[in-house]
Amino acid sequence: MTELFLRCAELYIKSLTFQNYRNLKNSELIPSKGINLICGDNAQGKTNLIECIWLFTGGRSFRGAKDSELISFDKESSKIQVCFYAFGREQNIEIHIKNNRRTATLNDVPKNYISQIIGKFCAVIFSPNHLSLIKSGPEERRNFIDSAICQIKPSYPSLLTKYRRVLNERNALLKDIPKHRELEDTLDIWNERLAQEGALIFCERINYIKKLSEYTAVFYSGISSGKEKINISYKNGYNSDIKMSIEEVKENMLNVLRQKQSDDIYRGFTSSGIHRDDLGVKIDSRNAKSFGSQGQQRSAVLALKLAEAAVLGDEKGEKPIILLDDVLSELDSSRQSYLLNKLDSRQVFITCCESNISCENKILFINNGNIIS
Ligand SMILES: Nc1ncnc2c1ncn2[C@@H]1O[C@H](COP(=O)(O)OP(=O)(O)O)[C@@H](O)[C@H]1O
Ligand SMILES: [Mg+2]
């Protein structure tokens, strides 16, 4: 396991301070460089602490909270600071939350937009909400893949935007055709464009999924003590695979668009393309969504998230911090033990309700927002 991460440098939090953040009492926290267990009863502030760390990535709250909800109930503003080691040097980020807005300072330089700190402090988060990655429909899985690629390939978001624009044009045309039959002749231009843009996205996704699936298999095998096998695949409706060139993929997409053209006109939307694809997740050759137990589904999401972190680490040359909220429940003791003992080559924060978990890691107790380390 350790050798999976050797190519990456270290990224870790040296200290963390918060003022008026949710229910957390103003203080400074010095975590361990390895695994940090955050223990406490329900509603004491464990998820709040994980959420606070996540904000330094530049992303929004993973709970979908508004910025104003992050400020302690009776206060007007909040300030959180992290001092961390990354890319070979000590760095810092400060985030101010006021008037339902977040502003940031990176290494003491104020930034105009919070998005300017993205990529400086890398983390991957697992929370029970992420179980939807297995339980929900394909859209969740496409979003997972797309946002993971966005983190490593700055030009990818614009590919998605272009594709969506062409897709909207084609869909608008499909709706107009029944009223203006002559418009059907112009549809093939949009078929061409959609296939052109779609093929570029397909190639990015399939290459990413290949790397992701290799790591996911290693992590899943570790979590299940080698007893179960996971298989990740890119399911697409135009018979394309990783061995094909962009031109071949485009050709395949175009053929399917043309074949389904009459159906699409009847329905008024485009029924094939990268916007309909899916990430297939099988455990021991069976669909994880339909047949996986709660523990297996949780293990699968966890393996995917750890794999996301590993690929991100390879691409960035820096191992992201791992944030695991409420992951231990519903996992048997050997799966728990894997998380508590085998991820030690990086900084990890794991929340749990039990205080008698036996491990050698640093334990932070949280009681009513007070952190005792
Ligand atoms: N803006 C806020 N100001 C003060 N307390 C808050 C705020 N938002 C949430 N809380 C409190 O934080 C507690 C929940 O913390 P949380 O981290 O979710 O608990 P857990 O330890 O179960 O993960 C609740 O008691 C809630 O009232
Ligand atoms: Mg919680």
Image (tube, rainbow, N blue to C red):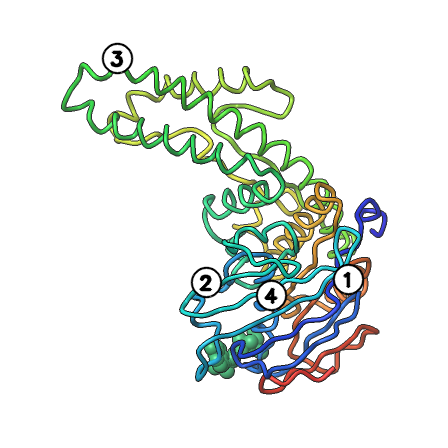
Residue 130 is situated, as x and y percent measured from the top left of the image, at: 54, 57
Pointer 4 local density, CA inside 10 Å: few below 14, some 14–19, many at least 20: many
User: Mark 3 or mark 4: which is in front?
Assistant: 4
Spatial separation of the CA atoms under disc 2 and disc 4: 21 Å
Q: Would you name the residue on which mark 2 appears?
A: 64
The disc, 2 or 4, on the residue closer to the chain's N-terminal end is 2
Q: Nearer the viewer, mark 1 or mark 4?
A: 4
Which mark is in front, 1 or 2?
2
Q: Report, in whole angstroms, how far the alpha carbon at label 1 lies from the one at label 2.
A: 29 Å
Residue at x 44%, y 29% (from the top left corner) = 273
Name the residue at 75% across, 67% down.
14
First in residue order: circle 1 vs circle 4: 4
Mark nearer the N terminus (3 vs 2): 2
Residue 55 horizontal/vertical position (percent): 57, 62
Residue that label 3 marks? 185
Front disc: 2 or 4: 4
Task: Name which residue type carries label 4.
Answer: Glu
> Which residue was labeled with disc 4?
94
Disc 1 designates what residue? 338
Of residues 182 and 72, the one nearer the viewer is 72
**Contact? badges 2 and 4 (CB < 8 Å):** no
Depicted 111 relative to depicted 179: above or below? below
Mark 3 belongs to which amino acid? Asp
**Pointers 3 and 2 in contact (C-beta within 8 Å):** no
Residue 356 in picture, x, y percent from top left: 75, 82
Q: Residues within 10 Å of mark 2 (few under 14, many from 20)?
A: few
| Badge 3 element | helix
Q: Position of residue 8 (x, y in %)?
A: 79, 47
